[in-house]
Amino acid sequence: MPRFSVIVPAYKVQAYLSECLESVLGQSYPDLEVVAVDDCSPDACGALIDEFAARDARVNPVHLPRDAGPAGARDAGPAGARDAGLTHATGDYLLFLDGADTLTPDALRAVADRLKETSEPDVLVYGHARTDRSGETVRDPLAQQQLSEEGPAPFRLDSRPGLLTVPTVVWNKAYRREFVEREGFTFPSGHHGHTPWTYPVLMSADSIATLDRVCVHSRGRGRGGVLDTGGAGQFDVFEQYDGVFAYLDARPELAHWRPVLFRRMADHLSALSVGPGRPAPGSRAEFLRKSRAHYRRYRTAGAKVRLRVRLRHALVRFGAHRVHRLLCLASSLNKRAVKLGSRLFRRSRGAALRLHYRVQRRLPLRADRAVFSSHRGRGHGCNPGALESAFRSLAPHIRTAWIARPEHHHTIPAATRRVRPGSAAYWTALARSKYLVNNVDFGRDLVKRPGQIMIQTQHGTPLKRMGLDLLDRPAAARDTDFAELLRSVDQWDYCLSANRHSTLVWERVFPAAYTTLEYGSPRNDVFQQATSADVSRIRESLGIPEGTVAVLYAPTYRDYRRTQRHTLDLERVLRQLGPRFVVLTRAHHSYDAPLTRAPGGRLIDVTDHPSVESLCLASDALVTDYSSLMFDYANLDRPIVVHADDWEAYEAARGTYFDLRAFPPGAVARSEDELVDIFASGHWRGSRSTQLRAAFRERFCPYDDGRAAERVVRRVVLGEGETPVVPRADRHPVPSAAAARPGSPLATVPRPGGPVSVPVTEYL
């Protein structure tokens, strides 16, 4: 008996069926069977199913007879195929997948793990994403909110009634086969056959659990949902709700769900009345009359309707064609009025803010003010964050402000003023502050005043081509306005540089009359200042198990790809390496591939963590591709492994300043298997890796001694001479947790005089 039976009805999906079946058979969890049902498909679906069955014994082909029903019976939907699949299924759990859809990688392993965690529930509801014809994948945000794994599990529907708002498709759940057989569930025919299946299943289940992970990619808009068909096909929805309420009538213990289902029915009918799949004009009046009859027939006392949906429910309640047209017209006029009012408000507000900015620019500069920003409104961090902390420490007479969107305000220190981008306070800060600090730019509307000092901190040592070097790289330059870029560069007074390589690049690709401060990267100061206690505290906050080796995986952006995704199967890597390893995965903000889940919580998603520096401190090694993070991480003198599986494509699209494979900071893997072998064999921390890292540090980390931010503040703000650089031999960055363990081969030289405690929380 297999663990899973995946039932796949196939009808006119020959172009997609192979991909669908391969997505199931290629799962990392192999304990499954595929019940592939040829639903009398007139194309090659039946032959494809037989081909898969011939080469994989887990495929059970089922061919429905063509004379099973009256001509055209297939137009009623895949109900018969799914019921046929039920009779042939032998697995512990049943999953359904339409023939054009796919399972995401490692979906079944994630489902199996969650079933085990939640004591084998009757139903497990998991996430799905819609894939349109262009290939763009979008997850339903409302469904995602309902799939939280927080709280006790399993549970009954009474504890999480919001699950009834999740799309009523059949393929976003796993069903315990004994439960389905005991309750005698079957699929009613019709385009809306999901409805009388899903609601009774959820209401009757003694135990339900959720999995907050995208397990299915559904191809096409609204497949299996309320918008999949139009015309006469929509009329079967009335029969389906008759079945739902008949089910309730036969089970008095479920009567308390009647008001909820009545509201769901009214929402459904109103969506069908005005949505993209609404009936044709000639049949719309009849559809509305039937909607009114159903509304009156099943209306339930106590069915409260929220104010914002009462208009839609009124359409169903009154059901007159003329009322329908009037309500649609009123709704359209209301939307236009709201848009017009919003547009007028934005324009008037923008004009008022522009006037405010002009007025502020005519007022005296405030020599005791400094304003900071990082990555266009993100949280406190990077080089500007380290400089802001140094301003408060070394120049306390300067009042600092940080520009960030509200969702990042929690990262800003309490002593620093919070400023929202685009607000009146934002324009006041830009107009009146003497010091302007950023790692990108403040936008084209900034007018730099005489006496203002702008510090461009940059955000890393460049490996990939930057600035004017992108003129002949259209894939990377995209819509870059190079004239605006040069105008912005002309406003810089100082540009920070971590090393001679960076200085030569910045001064060539950002040509202007600024002064380069080759002082090191302020954001790396914490690596020399943190203590082992800080490392332990950060690891504990991240949930890293004691005694494990934490590997930070931080890939960069690919200019040549339309969509961004992980190139490593992280769950497979962890299975190969064993329980001693943990992976902290920090995806680039543009990545859209869902993360897999490793058993025992060994794959920790830290993408949204506010400080990459604290993640570096928490880890024992770094795995990256071409991210500039490797130049910062080298300061910790911890192992670095480069995963360069697509170097040629990356070099062709973006271009680089040197061949990383010829001068790497550690071992280089050209495939996932090589990466696993590097860790399994110990090469990641071997003598050759140490030699490469030392040479890399010699070239790219000459000034990162823990005092880079201090040097900038003393030079720019206090007007003092340059602070001497600590010799490299006298620097002792905080050791990793693995290196700090007695007898570890990663052990480093202890810091003379013991650790120096610093308020590292300012960087977290």
Image (cartoon, helix red, strand yellow):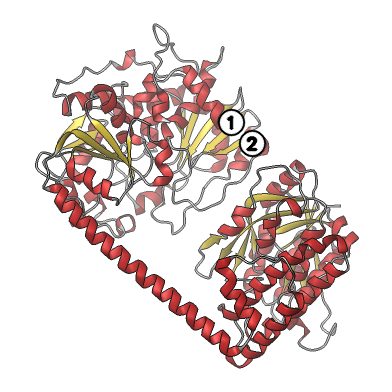
- Amino acid carrying mark 1 in the image: Gly
**Image location (x, y in percent) of residue 743:** 56, 12
The residue beneath circle 1 is 543
| Disc sitting over residue 658 in the figure | none
Q: Secondary structure at mark 2?
A: helix
Identify which residue, 18 or 701, lies in the foreground: 701
Determine whether label 2 and label 1 are within 8 Å by CB: yes
Q: Tell me the CA gap for discs 2 and 1.
A: 9 Å
Q: Residue at x 23, y 58 (%)?
A: 352
**Image location (x, y in percent) of residue 436:** 21, 39
Packing grade of label 2 (10 A; few <14, some 14-19, many >=20) is: few
**Image location (x, y in percent) of residue 37:** 78, 70
- Amino acid carrying mark 2 in the image: Gly
- The answer to whether any part of residue 39 appears in the image is no
Q: Residue at x 70, y 85 (%)?
A: 290
Q: On the rendered image, what quadrant is the C terminus found in? A: top left
